[in-house]
Image (spheres, helix red, strand yellow):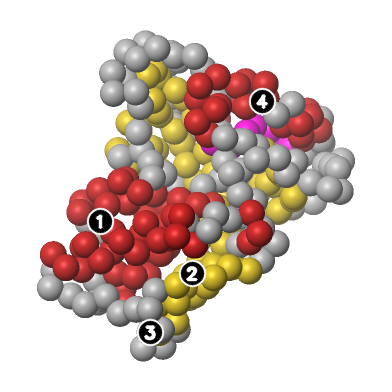
Amino acid sequence: MRPLSLFAPAKVNLALHVLGRRADGYHELDSIVAFADVGDRLTFTPADEFSIAASGPFAAALPQAADNIIAKSWVAAQAIARTRGRALPAVSVHLEKNLPVASGIGGGSANAAAALKGFLSLAGIDGINREIAAAGLAIGADVPVCLSGVACRMRGVGERIAPIAGFAPLPAILVNPLVEVSTAAVFRGLALDKGQSCGAPIADARDPALWRNDLAAPAIALAPSIGEVLERLAATPGVTRAFMSGSGATCVALCRDEHVAPDLDPAWWVARTVLS
């Protein structure tokens, strides 16, 4: 077996409408998702036993290996391989962690999706079917859309995914003030009771003027620096739209071209990208 390397792109929520809280406690979502050309990278190398190691600018912020979401993908891949009579070889996984942790751009979910694909590929299982998508959903709500890896409309808790045909690439700038925001805490900030409805669904999946992120207000209440980032981006000539992705704290500026130059704090994490 030769080493296998897979890219785990950042996931950006161009829209994130919270429709309400279901009776089971989960929140019903309607979201437009695209993927960046920046992200993490996983490398799989033959080994005597499964292990995870990490490097990169945000490696120190990761949980211990046993608690890493990649380990959950390993367990899920083993179960899938067993159902197909396949052997999953032991591997050492090296994660190059380039994306901030707990940043609203799906770094962990993208890593889990790439890991699941990688493990299954090593067992001779390629492609994504319902069984694999369901295994991804059990790992995390954003894992199925990260398994798809293409611009999508994502609904439910993350299980209903429809690719968007003809999605035009979008030049963008990602900015994170390097504060970690708890997704659970942001959702709690909505203060929705079980069974309670909230906002309206996306009216037009191709009209950004009708899109919103219902998690922005509770995220800003927890981390006011998000609001500062958004203000600076929105005030920049050439920025057509500034918004927060996911539960934060990463903010996104959609730009007319690659020459847009916002005034940003040098301590913030900034990445120029193209969303597709």
Q: Nearer the viewer, mark 4 or mark 1?
A: 4
Residue located beneath label 4 in the image: 222
The residue tagged 2 is 52
Residue at left 16%, top 68%? 82
Residue 73 picture location, percent across and down: 36, 59
Q: Which residue is mark 3?
A: 48
Q: Which residues are magenta?
A: 239-246
Left or right, 71 with respect to 106, comes to: left
> For the stretch drawn in magenta, what is the main secondary structure?
strand
Q: Earlier in the sequence, mark 4 or mark 1?
A: 1
Q: Reply yes or no: does residue 240 show up in magenta.
A: yes
The first of marks 2 and 4 along the sequence is 2
> What's under tag 1, amino acid-wise?
Ile
Residue 149 in picture, x, y percent from top left: 42, 55
Q: Position of residue 130 (x, y in %)?
A: 21, 51
Q: CA distance from mark 2 to mark 4?
A: 32 Å
Marks 1 and 3 close (CB-CB < 8 Å)? no
